C-alpha cells in the first residue's frame, strides 16, 4: 500500500513528465490547431501538478525531484523521433504513447493507494482523466 505523501509525489512526478514532454514538442509544432491542443494539455498538467503540490506542502512535504536521467532519456527519444518527421500525426502518436504509459502507471498507483484521503484520491483520478482526455484529443491528429 502507498500512503498520501507517496501518492501525491507520484502525481506530481507524472504531471511534471507530461508537462515537460509537451514543452519539448510544442516548440516544433507548427499547425495552429495542434499547437492549441498541446497548450490546453499543458495547462491541464500544470493544474494537476499545482493541486498535488499544494496538498503535499500543506501536509509538510514537498515533491521529490524528478529523475533527471528519465527526463533526459525522454527528451533524447522525442528529439530523435521528430528529427525526420515533426508532423502533427507523428507528435500525436508520441503523445498518445506517453499518456498510455501514464494511465497504466497512475491506475496501478491508485489500486495500491490506501485510500485514507478522498482529496488525494480525487487528484490522482484527475490525472487519470487528464491522460485519457489527452489521448482522445490527440486521436484527431493521427
Image (cartoon, grey):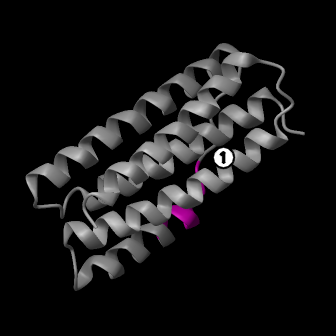
Which residue range is magenta in the image?
66-72
Q: Nearer the viewer, residue 133 or 84?
A: 133
Q: Nearer the viewer, residue 54 or 47?
A: 47
Task: Name the residue beneath numbered marker 1.
Answer: 106
- Give the answer, above or below, for where 132 lies relative to 21: above
Binning the other alpha carbons within 10 Å of mark 1 as few (below 14), some (14 to 19) or many (20 upward) gives many
Query: Quarter-wise, where is residue 92 in the image?
Result: bottom left
Q: x and y percent of residue 51 in the render?
A: 53, 23
Q: Which quarter of the figure has residue 95?
A: bottom left
* Spot occupied by residue 67 in the image (x, y as percentages of width and height): 60, 57
Task: Identify the residue shown where x is 72% and y is 35%.
Answer: 7
Point out the image quarter for the N terminus.
top right
For the stretch drawn in magenta, the main secondary structure is helix
Residue at horizontal 49 percent and vertical 46 percent from the top: 131
Residue 84 in percent (x, y) is at: 22, 86
Residue 32 versus residue 42: which sits nearer the camera? 32
Task: Name the residue nearer the viewer: 79 or 61.
Answer: 79
Residue at image position (77%, 18%) is 117
Asked where in the image residue 26 lies, by quadrant, the reply is: bottom left
Amino acid at each position: 500500500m502507498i500512503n498520501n505523501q507517496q501518492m501525491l509525489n507520484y502525481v506530481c512526478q507524472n504531471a511534471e513528465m507530461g508537462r515537460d514532454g509537451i514543452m519539448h514538442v510544442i516548440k516544433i509544432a507548427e499547425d495552429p490547431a495542434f499547437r492549441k491542443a498541446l497548450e490546453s494539455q499543458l495547462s491541464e498538467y500544470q493544474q494537476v501538478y499545482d493541486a498535488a503540490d499544494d496538498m503535499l506542502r500543506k501536509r509538510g512535504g514537498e515533491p521529490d525531484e524528478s529523475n533527471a536521467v528519465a527526463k533526459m532519456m525522454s527528451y533524447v527519444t522525442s528529439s530523435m523521433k521528430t528529427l525526420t518527421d515533426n508532423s502533427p500525426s507523428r507528435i500525436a502518436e508520441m503523445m498518445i504513447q506517453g499518456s498510455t504509459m501514464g494511465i497504466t502507471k497512475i491506475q496501478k498507483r491508485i489500486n495500491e493507494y490506501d485510500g485514507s484521503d478522498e482529496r488525494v484520491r480525487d487528484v490522482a483520478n484527475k490525472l487519470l482523466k487528464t491522460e485519457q482526455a489527452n489521448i482522445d484529443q490527440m486521436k484527431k491528429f493521427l
